[in-house]
Image (cartoon, rainbow, N blue to C red):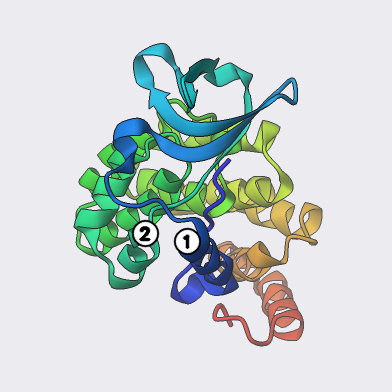
Amino acid sequence: MSTTNLSVGRWGWRLLPVIIWALVCSVPDGVLAQGAPGRIVKINKQELTGNITWLASQRGYEVAAGSTRTSVSLNQVASIQVAPPAELVRAIQSGDTATLSRIVDSYRMLGPDLDAMRALAEGLRRAGKGQEALDRFKKVMEHRAPETVPAEVSRVYWNILLDAERYDDLRNQLTAAIEKGPRPQVATAQLLRGEMDMRRKQYREALVNGYLRTIVLFANVKAVQPEALLKAALCFDELGESQNAEKMRRKLAQEYPGSPQR
């Protein structure tokens, strides 16, 4: 699990602890030749600290501590913490896609690659390079179970799949997240399921399986509620149910007056 949860602009307060972390324990350039310093906690609670390297051919990690090298298979890992490179925060703030791309490759499966990939993908989408963003993201997600990826990172990947109309791939991702993920991720997956049905003009399905389910069952996940309410209202509009649409808009205005969805 990444210790780097980066935010810029709408990413909000999440950026501050990352800046502090990066300044205190960031990884200098070139260190990845010997791995990145960090810690792995195994599912049996054993902790391993040292320079961590991802070994794709072995589907696992090597942890080097002095002259000792320990192999850990991916299915034995409960969490992984790796200090982000110093340039990560700067690259996100400036939109430096070259640096972000290098971090994605250098820190594959170490945690900082997720934060870099999130920012890189958003930049590529804005530049009209959706296919490149999809190809890069698929590689980053290759060995990761969908339910283990932070909701804010998953959302970017799911949006790219949605834009590409890769509905089967998206549905598989959402199903895995809904079945096994933590509540914030499940709520986000419900939103995307609604969005997928809505884009195909299946408005009733979008309401039942996506937006209303999110509003009712995930009321405590406040971050997703404004979008769920707004899009539920839009679906009701399409179905000609103006009274229900107005209820959704009234709830949005009353409970989330500062929301950009208003």
Nearer to us: label 2 or label 1: 1
Asked whether residue 108 appears in the rendered view, the answer is yes
Image position of 175 with respect to 11: above or below: above
Q: Amino acid at mark 2?
A: Leu
Classify residue 147 as left or right of residue 57.
Answer: right
The numbered disc on residue 37 is: none
Q: In terms of secondary structure, where does tag 1 sit?
A: helix
- Rendered-image quadrant of the C terminus: bottom right
Mark 2 and mark 1: Cα distance apart in space? 8 Å
- Rendered-image quadrant of the N terminus: top right
Q: Residues within 10 Å of mark 2 (few under 14, many from 20)?
A: many
Image position of 38 with respect to 142: above or below: below
Q: Residue 53: give x, y in percent of width and height.
A: 41, 28
Asked whether residue 202 appears in the rendered view, the answer is no
Between 161 and 9, the one lying in front of the other is: 9
Q: Amino acid at mark 1?
A: Ala
Q: In terms of secondary structure, where does tag 2 sit?
A: helix
Classify residue 11 as left or right of residue 53.
Answer: right
Q: Which residue is mark 1?
A: 22
The numbered disc on residue 88 is: 2
Classify residue 218 as left or right of residue 158.
Answer: right
Q: Residues within 10 Å of mark 1 (few under 14, many from 20)?
A: some
Between 56 and 8, the one lying in front of the other is: 56
Whether pointer 2 and pointer 1 mark residues with C-beta atoms closer than 8 Å, the reply is yes
Residue at 47%, 40% in the rendered image: 37
Q: Give the mark, 2 or 1, whose residue is nearer the N terminus.
A: 1
Question: In the current view of this chain or complex, which residue is farthest to the top?
Answer: 58
Residue at 76%, 55% in the rendered image: 218
Kindly indicate the quadrant of the structure image that contains residue 257: bottom right
Image position of 18 with respect to 143: above or below: below
Question: In the current view of this chain or complex, which residue is farthest to the front?
Answer: 67
Q: Residue 256: give x, y in percent of width and height.
A: 70, 80
